[in-house]
Amino acid sequence: MTESPKTIDILFFGDIVGKPGREAVRWYLESLNDSERPDVVIGNVENASHGFGLTEKNYNELLDIGFDVMTSGNHIWDRKEIFDYIYSADRLLRPDNFPAGNIGTGARVFDFDGFKVGVINLIGQVFMGNYNSPWERIDALVPQMLYETPILFVDMHAEATAEKVSFARYASSLGISAFVGSHTHVQTADERIMSNRTGYITDAGFNGAYDSVIGMHPDNAIERLRTMYPSRLDVPETSLVQVNACRFTIEVKSGICRRVTRVNLVKDLRESGSNLAEMPYHAGLGI
């Protein structure tokens, strides 16, 4: 039996948008040397297939890239083939507080080499839709999962900042290790450790086209907002991509997060090496 490490690093990628997003996270993971590689890779994938939903092909592609767990949100059902393959996609989560009877699962304990990580995927209620209470689900899930592991990770797909901050503070009191917000596609600069325990960021941002409107072609977004016509949103073809992620260093025995590091990079994939189109930003906060 492998001896458990003292700490592990969990790397979470914000919403992955289309092919540019998939290529961005691939480049970033391949650019890491052995000492920099995280122990667990998680990412929100509900926009990974041309901006809407997730195909089985792209699910398998992300597994090959190195993803261990994939979370999602309100766009998870946008590709109808999801209803055929989600039964066998044991690394894919959909929000746990979707209406009763929805296929798939929203929380699971994943067994790694020498440690386990419980991952919970939830969706917010403010400005989002008529979803079941995430508060009731976190109350039910955390005690059950703490029996298996002290390391609990939450991705809350939500619009309102106040809802995410409030929820994270409550979840921290229950004993979770890390909380990330997703959905807005704009990375926040508020990474912190709550209550000397829980790694936190309001929104991890998005991975995809840099010269875009939250991952979509700017011309499409401008036309839709300027004219109010229901214009089609497309993911632009580009080599200039951004990487938004957050890294959490967590004690294996206690589940306490000791460090939070925000990743915000821009890369022209046509360039060789690790030269960045803009200066990288790595912000670290620890206790």
Image (cartoon, rainbow, N blue to C red):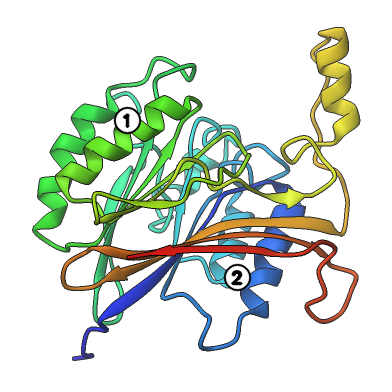
Amino acid type at circle 1 is: Ser
Where residue 51 sits in the image (x, y, percent)?
Answer: 70, 40
Tell me if label 1 and label 2 are in contact, CB under 8 Å.
no
Question: Do we see residue 269 in this rendering?
Answer: yes
Vertical relation: 99 (above or below) 63 = above
Q: Which residue is mark 1?
A: 166
Cα–Cα gap, marks 1 and 2:
34 Å
Where residue 234 sits in the image (x, y, percent)?
Answer: 81, 35
Horizontal side, residue 182 vs residue 175: left or right: right
Q: Sequence-wise, which precedes: disc 1 or disc 2?
A: 2
Viewer-side label of 1, 2: 1
Location of residue 99 (image quadrant):
top left
Residue at left offset 38%, top offset 26%: 163
Amino acid type at circle 2 is: Ile
Where residue 113 sits in the image (x, y, percent)?
Answer: 30, 81
The secondary element bearing badge 2 is classed as: helix
Vertical relation: 196 (above or below) 171 = below
Q: Residues within 10 Å of mark 1 (few under 14, many from 20)?
A: few
Q: Which residue is mark 2?
A: 65
Residue at left offset 86%, top offset 79%: 272
Q: Looking at the figure, which quarter contains the N terminus?
A: bottom left
Vertical relation: 278 (above or below) 5 = above
Q: Residues within 10 Å of mark 2 (few under 14, many from 20)?
A: some
The residue closer to the viewer here, 168 or 64, is: 168
Residue 13: image tag = none
Q: Looking at the figure, which quarter contains the C terminus?
A: bottom left
The secondary element bearing badge 1 is classed as: helix
